[in-house]
């Protein structure tokens, strides 16, 4: 099994479009599993498993995840501006000499971070 993250979502197709649009989860065809889970794949062979649920999705305040690091501060800035243009909620930003980051919310309230740090 490849590395993966399993998320409970309210609307698989809405979440699918979000993750394909902003985080590259359209590198390979999506797969529908026998239990209804929708598997999305990125170019790094990481999979995102989306399971549609009816119950409320509740998350602790600190919970967040990141799929990839940025290669430069400018890449983070460009991504942040794209999110703003598209109306995606931004929850936090850092812009320091040794760390540049932006966090946004997905359709279900999960917080995703894109960050750059010098090597």
Image (cartoon, helix red, strand yellow):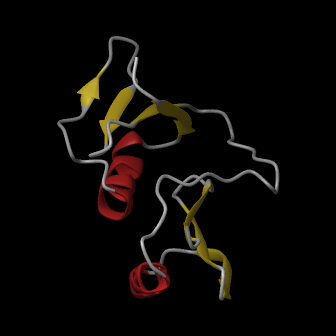
Total numbered badges shown on the rendered structure: 0
Q: Is residue 80 above or below residue 27?
A: below
**60 relative position to 101: left or right:** right
Q: Quadrant of residue 50?
A: top left
Residue at 32% across, 43% down: 44
Q: Is residue 94 above or below residue 46?
A: below
Q: Quadrant of the N terminus?
A: top left
Q: Nearer the viewer, residue 45 or 72?
A: 72
Q: Nearer the viewer, residue 106 or 71?
A: 71
Residue at 66% across, 33% down: 55
Q: Quadrant of residue 79?
A: bottom left
Q: Position of residue 71 (x, y in %)?
A: 42, 71
Q: Quadrant of the C terminus?
A: bottom right
Report the residue that reaches farthest toward the top: 34
Q: Nearer the viewer, residue 63 or 43?
A: 43
Report the residue that reaches farthest toward the front: 119
Q: Is residue 25 above or below residue 28?
A: below
Q: Is residue 33 above or below residue 92?
A: above
Residue at 32% across, 36% down: 45
Q: Position of residue 53 (x, y in %)?
A: 55, 31
Q: Nearer the viewer, residue 13 or 84?
A: 84
Report the residue that reaches farthest toward the right: 61
Q: Position of residue 110 (x, y in %)?
A: 62, 53
Residue at 60% across, 75% down: 101
Q: Position of residue 62 (x, y in %)?
A: 80, 55
């Amino acid at each position: 099994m490849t590395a993966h993250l399993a998320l409970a979502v309210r609307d698989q197709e809405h979440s699918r479009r979000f993750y394909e649009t902003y985080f590259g989860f359209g590198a390979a065809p999506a797969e529908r599993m026998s239990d209804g889970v929708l598997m999305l794949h990125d170019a790094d062979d990481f999979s995102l498993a989306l399971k549609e649920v009816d119950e409320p999705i509740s998350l602790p305040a600190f919970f967040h995840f990141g799929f990839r690091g940025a290669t430069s501060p400018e890449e983070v800035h460009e991504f942040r501006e794209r999110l703003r243009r598209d109306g995606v909620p931004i929850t936090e930003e850092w812009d320091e000499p040794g760390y540049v980051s932006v966090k946004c919310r997905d359709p279900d309230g999960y917080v995703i971070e894109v960050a750059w740090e010098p090597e």
